[in-house]
Image (cartoon, rainbow, N blue to C red):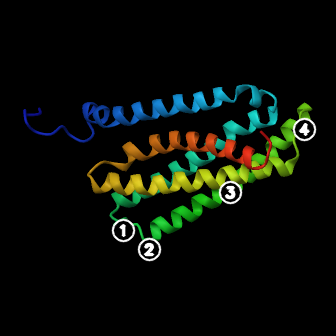
Amino acid sequence: MRKKGRQTSYYTVEGIIRRGLPVLTITCVMGIIVGQILNTRENSLLSMPAILILIPALVKIGGDTGSMLGARLSSAFHMGLGDRIYRNPVVHNSVIAAAIVGFVSSIFVSMLVFLASWLMGFGMPFTTLLGISLIAVVIELTVVYSATVAISFASHRFGMDPDDTVIPFIASLGDLVGVIGIFVALHLLNVL
C-alpha cells in the first residue's frame, strides 16, 4: 500500500497516465495541424491522384524509422550505454541504419506508387515521384532524426523514460514534417 507523500511507482496506471497524457495531447494537436495542411491543398491534391497514394506511405517513413531510432536509443539508455551524443557508437550506428532503411523505403515506395498509379491509369513519371520522395525524405529524416536524438537525450537527462516521450512524439512529428516535405518537394519540382 502506498503512503501519502511518496512518489507513485513508475509502472502504475496513474504514473503512466500522468506521463503519457501530456505527450498524447501534443501529438493530437500535431495530427490536427497535419490534417489542416492537407485540407488547404485539397483541390491541388485531388488533381494528382498519384500524390494522394504517395502521401500516406511517405510520411510514415520518417515517423516509423524515427521511432525505431528512438526505441534503440531508449534501450541504450536503459542498458547504460548512452551517455554522450557525440561520438557515441550507439547513436552513430543507429542513425546510419535508420537513414539507410528510410532511403531504401522511399525508393521502394516511389516504385510501388508508380506501378499502382500506372495500373490505375493516372500515372505520373517515375523520375518525378522519385524526386518528390527523395527530397521529402531528406527533409523529413533530417528533422525527425535530430528531434529523436535530442528528445531521447533530454528525456533521459531529466529523469523521464524516453519510451514514454520519444515514440509517440516522433511518429506525429514524422507525419507533420513529412507532409511539409512533400509540399516543399512539389514546389521545388514545379509539380504543384
Q: Are marks 3 and 2 in contact (CB under 8 Å)?
A: no
> Mark 4: which secondary structure?
helix
In what element is the residue under mark 2? Answer: loop
x 61%, y 32%: residue = 37
Which amino acid, by three-letter code, is at mark 1?
Answer: Arg
Label for residue 103?
3
Tell me the residue that label 4 is attached to.
118
Look at the image and tell me in which quarter the N terminus lies: top left
The image quarter in which residue 83 lies? bottom left
Q: Secondary structure at mark 3?
A: helix
Instruction: Please give left or right for residue 159 compared with residue 118 in the image.
Output: left
Point out residue 165 in the picture as x, y percentages from the top left corner: 39, 44
Q: Residue at x 78, y 49 (%)?
A: 189
Instruction: Return the residue at label 2.
Output: 87
Q: Check if mark 1's residue and mark 2's residue have beta carbons within 8 Å.
A: yes
> Going by the image, does 145 lie left or right of 161?
right
Crowding at mark 2 (Cα within 10 Å: few <14, some 14-19, many 20+): few
Q: CA distance from mark 2 to mark 4?
A: 46 Å
- For the residues labelled 3 and 4, say whether their Cβ atoms are less than 8 Å apart: no
Q: Position of residue 66 (x, y in %)?
A: 53, 51
**The quarter of the displayed image where residue 117 is located:** top right
Residue under label 1? 84
Q: Is residue 81 left or right of residue 54?
A: left
